[in-house]
Image (spheres, rainbow, N blue to C red):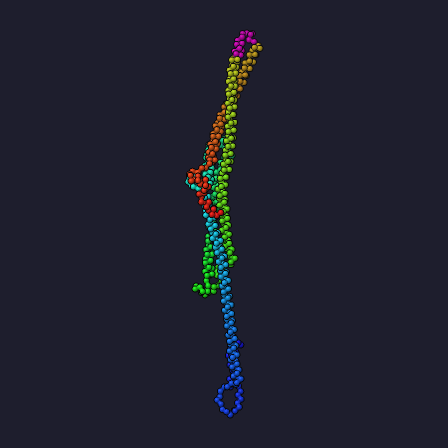
Amino acid sequence: MNGFESLSKPLKPRSEVAIHTIHPTLEQKPRSKYNVPDWFNHNYAISHDAERSRNVSHQVRQDGRRLINETYNESWWNKHDNDVRISDRLDEIDKWRKTLEYTIQDIDREIQAIQTTKQQCERYLEHMRSPLGQFSTSYYTYFVLRKIILFLDVALENHVTRDGRKAIDNVDDEAERELKKEVYVIDGIKRQLHQQVQTAFDQIARLTEAKQQLVRDLQDKHTAFAICEENLQLNEFSPNISYKPDPCRPIKGQITPEEWLAFSKYNKDRAEKEMYESTRLRENIFHTMGQSSSDLESQQKASEYSLRKRLHELERALTELEWQKKQTQEEILSNESDIERLEKAIRDKEPMIKLAMTRQENRHSRPGMDLVRDEVSYGLCDEIQQLKAEKRALEDQLKQAKHAWNILQQQLHRIEDEIAVKSNSIMLEKRALETRRRLNTEITPNTEVDRNRQLLNMDTSGLRPVLQSIY
């Protein structure tokens, strides 16, 4: 029971108290009366209750003032703490905004660089099939493209030239394989560049996707920054504040600060990874475009070496054939001289045979007993047989000599035909080597502008400013 409840307790009326009168016979008006102690008690109770009421009121007022101070201070510090939290959150969002903006700028430059590289590679492929006067590019690219086009033209022209070889000289030799390899090298460069163009296209798509993710994240952070900045500017006197229904309710899609940080870091790391891959791809493209010139130069040396080697072999074969022709012609002359001697010897045998036969026949006219088969007859018969045998031997030798002469004539014609084939092959090989001299011709600028670009090392491909902005 507090002070206010004790003050509300009523006093007992006098009718409820026994009244002892001194004069019982005195008639009085019936009414309730109190005793004097009750009167003093009543006054004391009022004073006491009033004092207690004032004490209670004072205590209540002090508690109210203390509560006001405490709630004000607590509210002020809560607002201050939340203002600090919002300010820290603004700083964190702003830091990531700047990080994302710098990353977007970097990825924009990388996209421009890879697009320029891709376009240059596409022009590189396109102009490998086009005349050199139909495009303008950097002097170095012009030099490489001209070498590739010249290599392709010269290789095809060498194939056409060497197809004019005849007979046995039309062989699949080392020079033929090296010339085919030149075409394969050029085709390999084309395939590799075409593959890198496709890879660059895919890389641009991945860079664009990463950029779009960064832009969306940046837009969300701009929105969040504006909301936090607006909240930081609000106070208890702002006109646009009001009660909201259940503001602490769980919102669908809310994430933790760790997830927020991991999402932004993932977007940044992904963009940096794609930029790194793009940079490596550009380096590979430049390496391929530069390596193509070295590969072609190496193949050029191999082809020219094989052509010179083949020419040397043909010249050695031609020298050998000319020596064989000379020896064969000398042998034919000697054979013809021997044939003449054999024919003369055969002709010389005929009078001798006629003489012996005439002698023998004349002795057959001897009469009577003088027809003796004497030693003369035997001698003449032996002489006739010997002369006939010698004539047959000479005739057989003449036939062999004429047969050898015919063989020598056939071989001579064969040698002469082979000399013609070798001479034709040597002429074609020299023409092929003469054609390849164009590959060693120094490329000079066609115009004064190109000459100035060469002297100043100027690049018209549009790639140098992009690379300078990146590095």
Range of the magenta residues? 355-372
Asked if residue 359 lies in the magenta stretch, the reply is: yes
Instruction: Name the residue located 43 percent from the left edge and 64 percent from the top edge.
Output: 239
Residue projecting furthest to the bottom: 25
- Where is residue 423? Give x, y as percent: 48, 28
Residue 113 visible? The answer is: no
- Where is residue 459? Give x, y as percent: 45, 43
* Location of residue 315 with respect to 189 vertically, above or below: above
Q: Main secondary structure of the magenta part?
A: helix
Instruction: Name the residue located 47 percent from the left edge and 59 percent from the top edge.
Output: 228
* Location of residue 102 with respect to 174 vertically, above or below: below
- Where is residue 370? Give x, y as percent: 55, 7
- Where is residue 461? Give x, y as percent: 44, 43
Query: Which quarter of the figure has residue 451?
Result: top left
Between 60 and 266, the one lying in front of the other is 60
Residue 379 visible? The answer is: yes
Between 433 and 32, the one lying in front of the other is 32
* Location of residue 13 with respect to 249 vertically, above or below: below
* Location of residue 442 with respect to 284 vertically, above or below: above
Residue projecting furthest to the right: 375
